[in-house]
Amino acid sequence: MAGGSDAVTLIANVPLFAALDEKKRKVIASQGKELTYKEGASIVDEGTMGVGFYLILEGKAEVRKGSKVLATLGKGQFFGEMSLIDEAPRSADVVAVSPTRCWALSSWSFSSIVKSNPEMAIVMLKEVVKRLRAAQSSPTS
Ligand code: CMP
């Protein structure tokens, strides 16, 4: 089953999809696929073109720029949206720091879902602003 019941459950509980009704969430869940990564595996590579959007189902991933850790993301958090939004290369590496399962959407599905559910864009924007504020307040090195 594409997406899996796990993805349906998680999607119901993450802020990004919380405003959508159950029917929509089920359709969305069926459009993604689950991917698993071993500890240390690279999920996204800085500088490459983005082909997917990721939601963490289980595990932890670090967002890294060179030797700097920009953020640690866990269950229910997303990444990979930036490159899909502006069609520019990935802004950072994202590396699994424990065995990690993600639910991933292709760039095409991501665009189509966001266009038909604009309330998602607002939630995503709020999270991106939160990350920008955190980045601004973190010491530079
Ligand atoms: P993208 O540029 O497609 O690929 C790398 C991803 O890391 C990026 O999308 C964001 O999802 C995430 N990311 C980049 N910078 C930060 C940051 N400062 N804090 C949290 N996540 C980030």
Image (tube, rainbow, N blue to C red):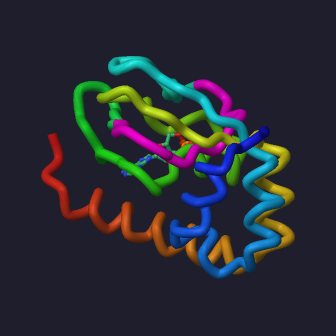
Which stretch is magenta?
Answer: 48-61
Report the side of 127 relative to 115 (left or right).
Answer: left
Q: Residue at x 56, y 75 (%)?
A: 123
Q: How many marks?
A: 0
Which residue is more in the foreground, 74 or 137? Answer: 74
Report the side of 59 relative to 48 (left or right).
Answer: left
Q: Residue at x 74, y 79 (%)?
A: 21
Q: Is residue 62 above or below residue 75?
A: above
Query: If the image is split into quadrants, where does the N terminus sit?
Result: top right
Q: Is residue 56 magenta?
A: yes
Q: Is residue 71 above or below residue 131?
A: above
Asked where in the image residue 111 lies, by quadrant, the reply is bottom right
Asked where in the image residue 10 lies, by quadrant, the reply is bottom right
**Residue 5 on image: x %, y %:** 66, 50
Q: Residue at x 69, y 53 (%)?
A: 85
Q: Is residue 55 magenta?
A: yes
Report the side of 105 relative to 57 (left or right).
Answer: right
Which residue is more in the foreground, 72 or 48? Answer: 72
Which residue is more in the foreground, 115 or 92? Answer: 115
**Residue 105 on image: x %, y %:** 72, 43
Query: If the image is split into quadrants, where does the C terminus sit?
Result: top left
**Residue 74 on image: x %, y %:** 36, 48
Which residue is more in the foreground, 78 or 25? Answer: 25
Q: Residue at x 52, y 29 (%)?
A: 44
